[in-house]
Amino acid sequence: MNGYSDFFSFNELTDSSSHPELVAQNRIDAIKFQNAGKRLSKLLESVRHILGDKPLKISSGFRNERLNSAVGSKAKSSAHLRFEAADVIPNGMTIQEAFTALIMAYRGRLLPDLRKVLHEGTWLHIEVNMKVEDHIGFFISKDNNKTWIKVA
């Protein structure tokens, strides 16, 4: 179960450095969403490739309700709860550069499984499509993630 894809493992996508005491139960709860987790890891492989084949730091992947609350998420229907999202920090480029590169890749039809990307200041929130034509878009916030503006 650990090898979801070449560069992203189940353990990495279910970890929490800020709340290690919640990781064991988080991993147990993630098992029922493992198909979504595998699909997400494949999308992250594509994102990694588009961003120059450099490592992506996963700051958050699957989060059960307790971990989601502990990290301060206010989204009651967060895609993290269904293993359909990861928060990533690219290596060797700014968040804005990575955001722009992903917009261009999506427009070039290189990310068909991408549902949504949020530019959250110091990381990108990336969501995977779980059904055909599930794409929502690319968004950025200029007020500390209170409101969102669709940019692509």
Image (tube, rainbow, N blue to C red):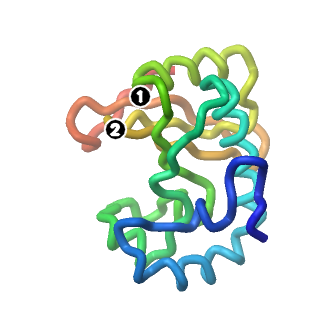
Instruction: Sort mark 2 into few (<14), some (14-19) or many (20+) by Cα contacts within 10 Å.
Output: few
> Whole-Å distance between the Cαs marked 1 and 2?
7 Å
Q: Label 2: which residue?
A: 122
When asked about the image quadrant of residue 142, the answer is: top left
> Is 141 positioned to the left or the right of 116 in the image?
left
Q: Position of residue 47 (x, y in %)?
A: 65, 33
**Residue 49, located in which quarter of the rendered image?**
top right
The N terminus lies in which quarter of the figure? bottom right
Residue corresponding to mark 1: 95
Work out whether mark 1 precedes mark 2 in sequence or the reverse, and give the earlier one: 1
Identify which amino acid the numbered label 1 is placed on: Ile
- The amino acid type of the residue labelled 2 equals Thr
Vertical arrangement, residue 79 with respect to residue 6, above or below: below
Q: How many marks?
A: 2
In the image, residue 38 above or below residue 1: above
From this view, report whether residue 41 is shown above or below residue 66.
above
Image point (57%, 52%), residue name: 85
CB within 8 Å, label 1 to label 2: yes
The percent coordinates of residue 64 (x first, y second) are: 50, 74
In this rendering, position of residue 108 left or right of residue 16: right
Q: Nearer the viewer, residue 117 or 122?
A: 122
